[in-house]
Amino acid sequence: MSFLSPVFLWGLPLVAVPVLIHLFGKRKLEVIRWGAMEFLLASATPRRRLMRLKDLLLMLLRAAVVLAIVCALAQPMISSSRFGATGPRDVILVLDNSMSTARKLGAETVFDRELAEVVRLCQQLNAGDRVRVLLASPKPDWFTAGPIAADAPHVRSLLARLRELRPNDGAADMLECLQRAIVAEPAGKDFTRFVTAVTDGQAHGWRAETPGAWSSIQGLARKSSPPVLTRVVLAGAPNPIVNLAIEKMTVGRAVLGVGQPATLTASVKNSGTTTSEPTSLSWRGGEQSLGVSAVPSLQPGAGTTVRLSQPFATPGVTEISCKLAGQDDLPADDSARLLLEVTRAVRVLLVEGEAKTDPVQSDTQYFLAALCYHDGSKDPSSSASAFQPKTIDYQRLPAEDLSVFQGVVLANIPRLSPDMVEHLRHYVNMGGGLWIALGEQTDVRAFNQAFFDQGVGLSPLSLLQPVGDDRELAKFTALAPPAADHPATALLADLQRLDIDRVRVYRRHQFSSDIGSSVPVLLRAEGGAPLAVEKNLGRGRVIVQAFPLGLAWSNLPLCHSFVVMVHEWLWYLTEPSLVKRNLQPGELLQVSRSISGSDGIASLETPSGWTAQLVGSEEDGRLIFRYPKTQLPGDYNLTVSGAAQGPRSDKFLVSRDPDESNLTPLSPQQIGTLSEAGGLAFGSDPFYQPPGHQVIAQPRALAGWLLLGLVLVMVTEAAVAFWLARQRHIALPAVEMEPTFRV
């Protein structure tokens, strides 16, 4: 027991006042013995003893009145658990509705079993309890607006809404869910919180390999007042799993030119516990069938890769899908989708240096030829490539609006003004691609000062003086095979089909020798010297090439590899500026529009059917619309309103987490880790309290009960005092004695 105002306890000695009054109230009378009263006194002795007992009762009642007043002022607090109860409960149900809960178990699913566990749990609630539901996928989200009373009508309404739920294609982070439940606002004062996670027991999402994070969760639960009890109810089944899943589908390039082939790849894995049967995988592009591929039999845990190459002649955004034949325990991962954009125009600005009289020495002519741009034509549409180049003299560069170009190529130009270099740096930061091809017009000192700028500029490395002699063709530097795992050099690394090993560099600029491992190198000389380096700056990319694009210092334009290199590097550089439509869960959705073509307002329809209103932010003369909450896989449709051109829609697709197809349950070791580090109790009793962790309800105030008792004692004391007073003053009839005379 505790007291809110213990200072009033100093008044407890006042309880002795009625006792003292009782003791000093007894008067000692002078006794005069009278023989005639002898028999009367003998008869009054029992009555006197009874009166003493009644006086003692009156004294105790008066002492109880004083005691009740003092205790009521001190406001005692006592735990309700001392009376055999823990008070009302604040129950939070964490319901796992991730994709893995759609697994079939005969005629029902794992999610159906989870709902059955929720029904069983709700049947154990009392009317004074409070309950709420937190959905785990794709991110912790409250299903109920707040705590609701656990009486019969509210529970029936809650269960009816829960039965309408279906698992989504998202994943669940159970650590984040439990943390969200523990720190939630309390349902009220004196409520004991129970957090119960109802899940299928899939190991993915529990992060059992991070016991430190779970230790912080346990500490957070213990520091709560009162401490929070966390419980995990597993609704899955350990029976054999039959599941052949498409983990992901990818395309070599998400944006293609008209007529260019797209290489589609599907990764298929047997995530079940039994060997899969041979099956087939069908491909579709929109409503059109693209073909069927065979999928061999796979052992548990084994995977295979299925590819398809398909050209697309119609510009626009096309949805590509693939689907496995047959049925298994988890139909949600039997198919996959992606968006492929076919375009006619990717605008590139080609900036050339001082004009040359010999066209053989021109850098831009070979570059345009690699893009199939006909010599002398000024119409960009004459190019058979998706890239539409615009060629200008370097002196006209300041007058160009770089925001309308996805890539800029500086082909052997002299020095630029500091303002122009800063403008290029801002262009790259905003997602543009920059290709710098050095040559004889490059001023090394000016380049280091403006482009390298002590490591914070556009170039990742500084330059040294050029080496080699372009007139001695017998002396050259050969190229080492480039990396096959880099998207810009993957095709160049194929020495069987391309001739990158036949490239001869006669003269080149030297990069500084203090190159670090953090600087990516696209091309190297056989001795290891870097010939083309890359830098990521902001959202954009920069490639610096140590020799020109023409025949002045190398024979690269005469090799077949040159055409492939020009296309691959331009696609790689312009990729950040193109609209990225295929996203991973949680990846930023972003699109830009011109200020003149939009009124700054956009609406985004999410896969759940909810519509978000977006306001564009002005950056570098364009409006940027961003949306970061893309955890739920599915289609996102963005509509940007425009005053002049009308609304324009863009489609985005968020793919699912491939690990959700892994139905491996929590192992006993993982459960032990979660129990020890996180303090989680696994079992079927949602309100189980382990020994030594008994939760005591918040203390309750007794002042109200004491005041009520005070009134009752005072009424009793008044009644007893009145009764005793009447007993003492009972009116006896007078006794008359008649005189008797004898004669």
Image: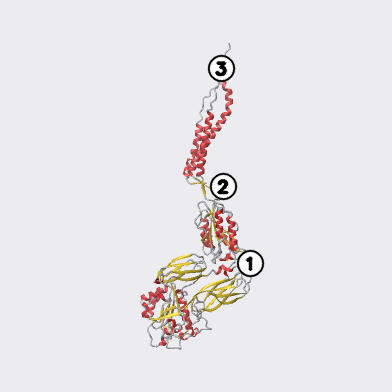
Q: In the depicted view, which residue is nearer to us: 37 or 658?
A: 658
Please rate how many residues cluster around mark 3, counting C-alpha atoms within 10 Å: few if below 14, some from 14 to 19, many from 20: few
Badge count: 3
Q: Quadrant of residue 98?
A: bottom right
In the rendered image, residue 385, in percent from the top left (x then y), is placed at 46, 81
Residue, x 52% and y 43% (percent of image)?
705
Q: Position of residue 361 (x, y in %)?
A: 41, 86
Report the front residue among 162 and 586.
162
Taking the spot 44% from the left edge, 66% from the top edge, the residue there is 614
**Farthest top residue in view:** 743
Q: Secondary structure at mark 3?
A: loop
How far apart are the two marked residues, 3 and 2, measured between alpha carbons?
A: 71 Å
Q: CA distance from mark 3 to mark 1?
A: 117 Å
Q: Which label was assigned to residue 738?
A: 3
Q: Is residue 660 left or right of residue 373?
A: right
How many residues crowd around disc 1 within 10 Å: few (fewer than 14), some, or many (20 or more)? few
Q: Nearer the viewer, mark 3 or mark 2?
A: 3
Q: Residue 704, position in %: x, y?
A: 50, 44
In this view, the mark in front (2 or 1): 1
Mark sitting earlier along the chain (3/1): 1
Which residue does the numbered mark 1 point to in the structure image? 240
Residue carrying label 2: 83
Q: Quadrant of the C terminus?
A: top right
Asked whether the viewer can see residue 526, the reply is no
Which mark is on residue 34? none
Q: Amino acid at mark 2?
A: Phe
In-front residue for pair 439/91: 91
